[in-house]
Amino acid sequence: MRLRITFAKTDAMRFTSHLDLHKTWERTLRRANLPLAYSQGFNPHPHINLASALPLGFTGEAEVVDIWLDQTLLVPQIASDLERAAPPGIKISKIQEMDDYSHLTIANHHNLSTFSSYFLHNLILLLKV
């Protein structure tokens, strides 16, 4: 099961680096007792994918993290477990179930939105002429 979590990184987490934010999510998911999916191999890691990093000292209202679980669970139950386990500074705003094999990854989603805004900006400039 793949989940896409949209969250806010508030002032309490402002000076937390991207790597520390990744570790914070790993601890939060473990605290919530969610059945994380792990990589195969000698040193397994949980499948957690954070979107592009914010500069140190910045906050964000619509940050995205993808997580993979070994079992299928109900999204409302996951949301309540994560709300209780989340540290100060992380406010979860939306959790949605994604297709495990979806080709629209976080990086592709970011590129698509950048392309869309670029396209609209040029279309507006064209219409003004």
Image: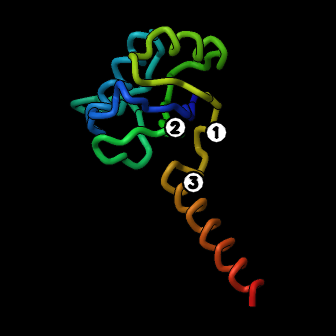
C-alpha span from label 2 to label 3? 17 Å
48 vs 118, left or right, is: left
Nearer mark to the viewer, of 2 and 3: 2
Label 2 belongs to which residue?
Answer: 61
Query: Looking at numbered disc 3 in the image, what kind of residue is underneath it?
Result: His
Q: In this figure, what is the number of numbered marks?
A: 3
Label 1 belongs to which residue?
Answer: 99
Give residue 109's mark: 3
- Compared to residue 36, the image places residue 109 above or below, namely below
Label located before the other in sequence (1 or 2) = 2
- Compared to residue 123, the image places residue 89 above or below, namely above
* Front in this rendered view, residue 124 or 1: 124
Label located before the other in sequence (2 or 3) = 2
- The kind of secondary structure element at disc 1 is loop
Query: Looking at numbered disc 2 in the image, what kind of residue is underneath it?
Result: Glu
112 vs 53, left or right, is: right
Residue at x 26%, y 37% (from the top left corner): 17
Across and down, in percent, residue 127 comes to: 77, 84
Residue at x 59%, y 68% (from the top left corner): 115
